[in-house]
Image (cartoon, rainbow, N blue to C red):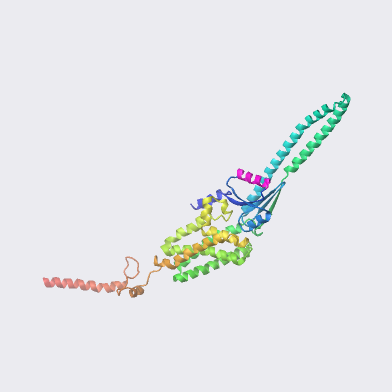
């Protein structure tokens, strides 16, 4: 199941309603949209922009992954390697495909026009020669000149048509990286590889706080928050300090990492608080074997199957990966939904840590406290089932012996 959870989304990577911009409403832009919609139905979610400046702003705001500015003779691909190197490569290839289709269509139109001109030329020469009614010699000379001129015109016309076809067939493709990824992590490998270790560390933090440390609920909450922030700082020191993968807005990026760790660790600790150690397995499986492969950190959420995309962005690993990417490269734009998801998981987990001990006490109450809290009778001692403490044996034995002797005395008296 773990292999399937990781391998299946990776084997089904393809654009699904990928937000992409189209600049302008010209005939060339409409032809590009029709070509993409016909060639890859359902792959792109097109959004129109009046000019390139508007499209660039939309990319920086994370409204779209990129845009195509289609003009006669040129195509400009606006992309963002910081949003996803995989999507940037996809848009680059798509732009080249658009250019190839436009070149083929332009060459076909130029060839059809040249053929129509060549077909119309002999008829025009024939009607011109018959109308003038020149002598045979003149006709011969004229036809010779006409023939020479016709061949020359035909040659020039075909040459012009041919050069026009070649010129029309050449579509220049230009690629512009609007938001560039760090040069130290050009493929985003460091960023995506950090998610799984961070998830495992969050599970370990929850395990230690919930099962090992004998703390009051409020103290557990404080420890979870402090340790999550410390772990996030360690992640940031490695990812940026040593590897340079998170280059911008350092404080916000650290806070995003801390919130991601807190959401995963607090939820796991809350599950353990509610149902005991049995809550560790489902929580770890949800975060590690569902949240990580469904996060889309190695490609993009819109490249995963639709159900996987929707589930992944509602889990802390997916929301955290998108949030960290937004703070590290896009000034936090488009991060409100991801923050809301992480805050929701954190609040649910911390609430369970605070009040869940009433449902499932993690530590047994000492005998003395139980005796004072009871109605006056001593509480039974929390000992191993089937093994009676020595103090209990000493206190009960005289009663049993006395009862046994008293019964023998009554039997003797009756006799």
> Magenta span has 250?
no
List the single residue furthest toward the left: 415
Q: Which of 165 and 255 is in front in this view?
A: 165
Where residue 304 appears, as percent x and y from the top left, is: 55, 51
Query: Which residue lies at the image location 75% right of the left edge and 41% below the top edge?
Result: 166
Question: Between residues 248 and 53, which one lies in front from this camera angle?
Answer: 53
Instruction: Find out whether residue 29 is within the magenta segment.
Output: yes
For the stretch drawn in magenta, the main secondary structure is helix
Q: In which quarter of the image is residue 374?
A: bottom left
The count of marks equals: 0
Q: Report the magenta residues as a range.
A: 26-39
Kindly indicate the quadrant of the structure image that contains residue 134. top right
Q: Is residue 172 above or below residue 351?
A: above
Vertical arrangement, residue 129 with respect to residue 196, above or below: above
In the displayed structure image, the side of residue 90 where residue 308 appears, left or right = left
Q: Which of 360 and 390 is in front in this view?
A: 360
Instruction: List x then y, in percent, for residue 229.
Output: 54, 67
Residue 256: % across, % down: 56, 64
Between 227 and 61, the one nearer to me in the picture: 61
Image-based side of 398 in relation to 126, left or right: left
Could you tell me if residue 7 is visible in this image?
Answer: no
In this view, which residue lies farthest toward the top? Answer: 136
Which quadrant is the C terminus positioned in?
bottom left
**Residue 222 point in image, percent of width and height:** 49, 70
- Name which residue lies at 53% across and 63% down: 261
| Residue 331 visible, this orientation | yes
Horizontal side of 239 relative to 373 (left or right) equals right
Left/right of residue 75 with respect to residue 301 in the rendered view: right
């Amino acid at each position: 199941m773990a292999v399937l959870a990781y391998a299946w989304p990776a084997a089904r990577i393809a654009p699904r309603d990928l937000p992409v911009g189209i600049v302008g409403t010209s005939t060339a832009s409409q032809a590009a949209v029709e070509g993409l919609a016909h060639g890859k139905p359902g792959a792109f979610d097109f959004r129109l922009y009046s000019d390139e400046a508007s499209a660039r702003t939309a990319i920086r705001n994370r409204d779209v992954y990129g845009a195509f500015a289609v003009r006669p003779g040129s195509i400009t691909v606006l992309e963002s390697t910081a949003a996803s190197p995989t999507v940037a490569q996809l848009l680059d290839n798509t732009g080249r495909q658009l250019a190839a289709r436009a070149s083929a269509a332009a060459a076909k139109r130029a060839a059809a026009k040249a053929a129509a001109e060549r077909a119309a030329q002999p008829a025009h020469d024939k009607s011109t020669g018959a109308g003038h009614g020149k002598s045979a010699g003149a006709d011969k000379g004229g036809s010779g000149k006409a023939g020479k001129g016709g061949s020359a015109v035909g040659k020039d016309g075909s040459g012009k048509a041919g050069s026009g076809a070649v010129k029309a067939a050449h579509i220049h493709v230009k690629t512009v990286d609007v938001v560039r990824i760090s040069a130290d992590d050009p493929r985003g490998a460091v960023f995506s590889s950090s998610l799984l270790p961070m998830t495992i560390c969050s599970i370990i933090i929850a395990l230690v706080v919930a099962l090992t440390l004998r703390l009051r609920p409020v103290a557990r909450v404080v420890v979870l928050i402090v340790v999550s922030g410390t772990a996030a700082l360690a992640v940031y020191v490695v990812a940026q300090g040593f590897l340079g993968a998170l280059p911008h807005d350092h404080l916000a990026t650290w806070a995003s990492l801390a919130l991601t760790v807190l959401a995963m660790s607090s939820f796991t600790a809350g599950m353990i608080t509610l149902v005991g150690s049995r809550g560790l397995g489902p929580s770890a499986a949800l975060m590690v074997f569902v949240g990580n492969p469904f996060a889309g950190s190695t490609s993009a959420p819109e490249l995963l199957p639709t159900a996987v995309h929707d589930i992944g962005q509602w889990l802390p690993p997916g929301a955290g990966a998108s949030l960290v990417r937004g703070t590290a490269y896009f000034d936090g734009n488009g991060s409100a939904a991801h923050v809301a998801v992480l805050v929701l998981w954190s609040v649910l987990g911390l609430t369970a840590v605070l009040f869940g001990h009433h449902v499932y006490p993690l530590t047994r109450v000492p005998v003395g406290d139980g005796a004072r809290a009871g109605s006056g009778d001593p509480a039974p001692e929390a000992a191993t089932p089937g093994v009676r403490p020595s103090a209990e044996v000493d206190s009960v034995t005289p009663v049993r012996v006395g009862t046994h002797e008293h019964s023998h005395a009554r039997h003797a008296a009756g006799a």
